[in-house]
Image: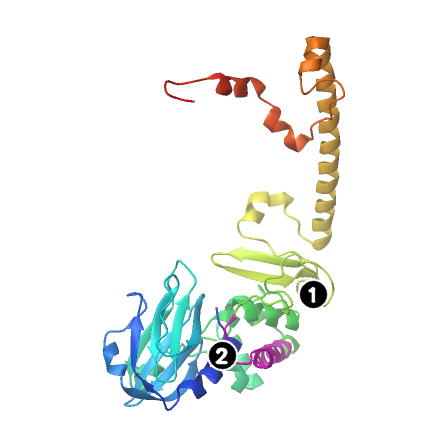
Amino acid sequence: MPELPDVTLYVERLAPLVIGETLQGVRLASPFLLRSVEPPLAAAAGRRVTAVRRLGKRIVLALEGGLFLVLHLMVAGRLRWRPAGAVIPGRHGLGAFDFDSGTLLLTEASSKKRASLLLVQGEAALAALDPGGLEVLDADLPSFRAALVRESHTLKRTLTDPAIFSGIGNAYSDEILHRARLSPFKRSTDLDGEETERLFAATRDTLVEWLERLRHDTEAFPEKVTAFRPEMAVHGRFGLPCPRCGAPVQRIVYAENEANYCAACQTGGRLLADRALSRLLKADWPRTLVQLEERQRKQRRGAGAAGAAGGAGADAGVAAGAVAAGAAADAASPAGPGTRSIPAAAAPSAARPARRGRRAGSSRPGSR
């Protein structure tokens, strides 16, 4: 999902392209995109764009006459700037905003169409769409602290709640908490003064750093907006080494979200319990990085021993079969003397020769 840095970049690059331009019309390729009825979408045609704003994770096109087009890209929605009159892509295209200077295309590469468009009249109607979260880049430490402790939730949920903090989602919350060296599941009301200051600084620094990075790396209109970037510390880097300490990045998947974290840096080496898998494994669930590494070593040793035992068993079985069948059968059989043993992992494919033979020999009228 495009978050504060990505949406801010969209706004900054879109503004010089459309401010002062007249919106010729809006073309819809999906009936599910438009989520408002009054005023009708046709009322936006022929009006000049006066401003482009960010409202949380939404993009707002302000039009003459107090009308506002509000775009929410959700998870997979993306914007493309193309020459005037560009065709809406057939597979992922949702709509197009036509100007004399070019066409703004809206696409969504997902089977779940969540992106939305609203047309509202007046500042009051626009303000009603604002979840009310704190703009961290405009806030001071006391206001940040007040928002943080207003409700008792995990830090991961608190940071991504648009009613508490504006513009932060799954990706940048992972990066913020890693920089702050805080567990994603620590309660927001349990932070002491030093931890709160650390989180405040990490939130601001992470958002500013990534906004500057995106500005520098994007020469024109942003075309490759993604939540997974190789420069990120933990988000989307499950199993890869933490850039701070080298420990493997851990991940918890829940509902349609995930939390990526470094156990060594953020939880004192303790592995956070996955709701589903930890309940399934119960006592076998590793509690720490040390237990996880020991479990992995045992699995590797067990796999090696099983492979060796399987190879020996296969050799013994081949020898026994050769003795029972006689020399003639040895010569005709692919598993005769001198044949390499079959690895244990491959054994099931040769475990039921009689059944395979019945299938091969069976026939039905008209079958070949």
Q: Secondary structure at mark 2?
A: loop
**Residue 202 lies in magenta, yes or no?**
yes
N-term mark: 2 or 1 = 2
Is residue 76 visible to us here?
yes
Give the residue type that dot 2 points to. Phe
Q: Secondary structure at mark 1?
A: helix
Label 2: how many residues lie within 10 Å, few (<14), some (14-19) or many (20+)? some
Image side of residue 252 versus residue 268, left or right: left
* Image height of 260 relative to 305, above or below: below
Colouring of the image: rainbow
> Which region shows up in magenta?
197-225
Percent across and percent down for residue 95 are 34, 71
Label 1: how many residues lie within 10 Å, few (<14), some (14-19) or many (20+)? many
Quarter holding residue 206: bottom right
Which residue does the image show at 75% across and 25% down from the upper left? 312
- Mark 2, residue position: 221
Percent across and percent down for residue 276 are 53, 49
